């Protein structure tokens, strides 16, 4: 069992997948740089691992370039996996996910944000508790650098993709008319593409990705029976907005301390803040009696993909995206200025925002504001502009 887990964690397995998809290290692609490529799988006992035999000139070239150079031999696959990897980044979360709220059903978006917040928090904490490394480079080509300082297991991209795809799939049948088999195929395709993209970009091992998907699926199965009860509590309880703000803020401040700085605490605070702001916003909408949910007998027909509907959807995307990005920038700037002034930190000190007393409140305030604007204000702006 341990040997099998070690095999799934092996960097060479990831590198082999990359090579088969047409992503090759320049050094590995040159015939004068040694013999054949090492085979996958863990080395046998008593046998030296070929990955340990490095040419000193390779190390010099790697140092000169900052990171190993690579060659792309299959551009369609390259762009497909980069696009799939982008489905787990902030730009996607802040622009595309709210479209479910604006153009489909706020109910589905609320369910989605709740599960996304829970799954991502569990995944981020597990990374910093387990402290398992990411794949080694070389032999792996790493296409992302921002999160390289984070630990590997589990893959939160795999967790988020699984949670998002299957939360919508499980919640949508009671709200919208569609073929469940088609929805299942779409959910499997999207989540699989995101999982494979983490191997292609060299950011996770096979074990990281498999564990991420399985942990997310387990959370969905364990919480599914309580989704309806949580909906009622979230929308009607008087303590709901207080709990929605105080609990995520507490979890952000008590996030496990790391021996080295990485983006996990900041990213987790971002997620918790967005979830908190959205939760309060949905509660406010319920109290005001204007939830912007589909009218008529549920499940309603799936919206027709006419030219007019697509134009309205594009208009909502542009207006809503501009509102959220503007809110993000304004809240980030104002909160950082206030915190820098409070702690007597010069604005030129870019590293100061890594300190917990600055990073946690500025990210939490920023993304709580984004969640509030998305859930309360954006649809009301659409009504004023006549594009809802």
Image: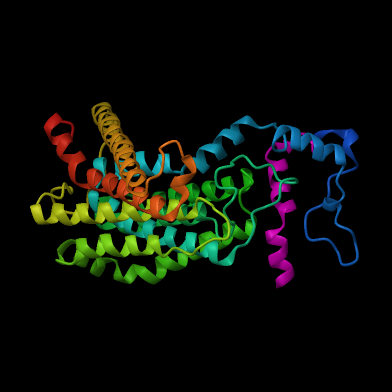
> According to the image, what is the colour scheme of the structure?
rainbow
Between 272 and 356, which is closer to the camera in this rendering? 356
The residue segment tinted magenta is 1-28
Q: Position of residue 278 (x, y in %)?
A: 26, 52
Q: Position of residue 182 (x, y in %)?
A: 40, 49
Q: Residue furthest front?
A: 344
Q: Position of residue 208 (x, y in %)?
A: 59, 58
Q: Quadrant of the N terminus?
A: bottom right
Q: Is residue 3 magenta?
A: yes
Q: Is residue 95 magenta?
A: no
Q: State the image quarter where residue 313 is shown.
A: top left
| Residue 252 in view in this figure | yes
User: What residue sits 84% from the left and 45% below the top?
Assistant: 37
| Residue 184 in view in this figure | no
Between 298 and 126, which is closer to the camera in this rendering? 126
Q: Position of residue 158 (x, y in %)?
A: 51, 54
User: What residue sits 43% from the left and 67% below the top?
Assistant: 219
Between 267 and 355, which is closer to the camera in this rendering? 355
Is residue 14 rendered to the left or right of residue 268? right
Is residue 126 rendered to the left or right of residue 345? right
Q: State the image quarter where residue 328 is shown.
A: top left
Is residue 234 rendered to the left or right of residue 31? left
Q: Quadrant of the C terminus?
A: top left
User: What residue sits 60% from the left and 63% below the top?
Assistant: 131
User: What residue sits 84% from the left and 33% below the top?
Assistant: 30
Is residue 96 rendered to the left or right of residue 207? left
- Residue 154 versus residue 141 in the image, above or below: below
- How many numbered discs, if any? 0
Query: Dominant secondary structure of the magenta stretch?
Result: helix
């Amino acid at each position: 069992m341990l040997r099998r887990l070690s095999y799934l964690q092996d960097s060479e397995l990831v590198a082999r997948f990359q090579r088969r998809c047409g992503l090759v290290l320049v050094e590995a692609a040159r015939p004068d740089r040694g013999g054949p490529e090492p085979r996958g799988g863990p080395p046998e006992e008593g046998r030296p691992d070929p990955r340990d035999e490095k040419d000193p000139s390779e190390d010099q070239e790697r140092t000169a370039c900052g990171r190993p150079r690579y060659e792309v031999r299959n551009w369609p696959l390259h762009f497909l996996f980069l696009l799939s990897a982008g489905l787990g980044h902030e730009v996607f979360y802040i622009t595309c996910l709210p479209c479910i709220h604006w153009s489909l059903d706020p109910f589905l978006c609320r369910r989605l944000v709740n599960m996304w917040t829970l799954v991502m928090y569990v995944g981020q904490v597990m990374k910093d508790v387990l402290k398992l490394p990411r794949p080694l480079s070389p032999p792996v080509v790493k296409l992302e650098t921002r999160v390289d300082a984070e630990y590997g297991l589990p893959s939160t991209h795999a967790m988020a993709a699984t949670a998002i795809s299957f939360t919508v799939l499980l919640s949508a049948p009671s709200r919208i008319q569609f073929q469940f088999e088609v929805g299942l195929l779409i959910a499997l395709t999207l989540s699989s593409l995101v999982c494979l993209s983490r191997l292609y970009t060299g950011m996770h091992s096979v074990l990281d990705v498999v564990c991420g998907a399985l942990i997310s699926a387990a959370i969905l199965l364990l919480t599914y029976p309580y989704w309806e009860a949580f909906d009622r509590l979230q929308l009607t309880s008087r303590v709901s907005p207080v709990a929605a703000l105080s609990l995520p803020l507490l979890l952000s401040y008590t996030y496990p301390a790391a021996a080295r700085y990485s983006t996990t605490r900041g990213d987790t605070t971002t997620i918790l803040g967005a979830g908190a702001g959205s939760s309060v916003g949905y509660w406010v909408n319920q109290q005001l009696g204007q939830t912007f949910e589909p009218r008529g007998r549920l499940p309603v027909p799936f919206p027709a993909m006419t030219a007019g509907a697509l134009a309205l959807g594009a208009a909502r995307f542009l207006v809503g995206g501009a509102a959220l990005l503007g809110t993000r920038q304004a809240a980030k700037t104002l909160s950082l200025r206030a915190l820098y002034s409070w702690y007597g930190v010069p604005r030129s000190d870019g590293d100061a925002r890594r300190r917990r007393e600055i990073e946690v409140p500025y990210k939490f305030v920023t993304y709580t504001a984004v969640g509030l604007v998305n859930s309360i204000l954006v649809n009301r702006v659409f009504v004023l502009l006549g594009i809802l």
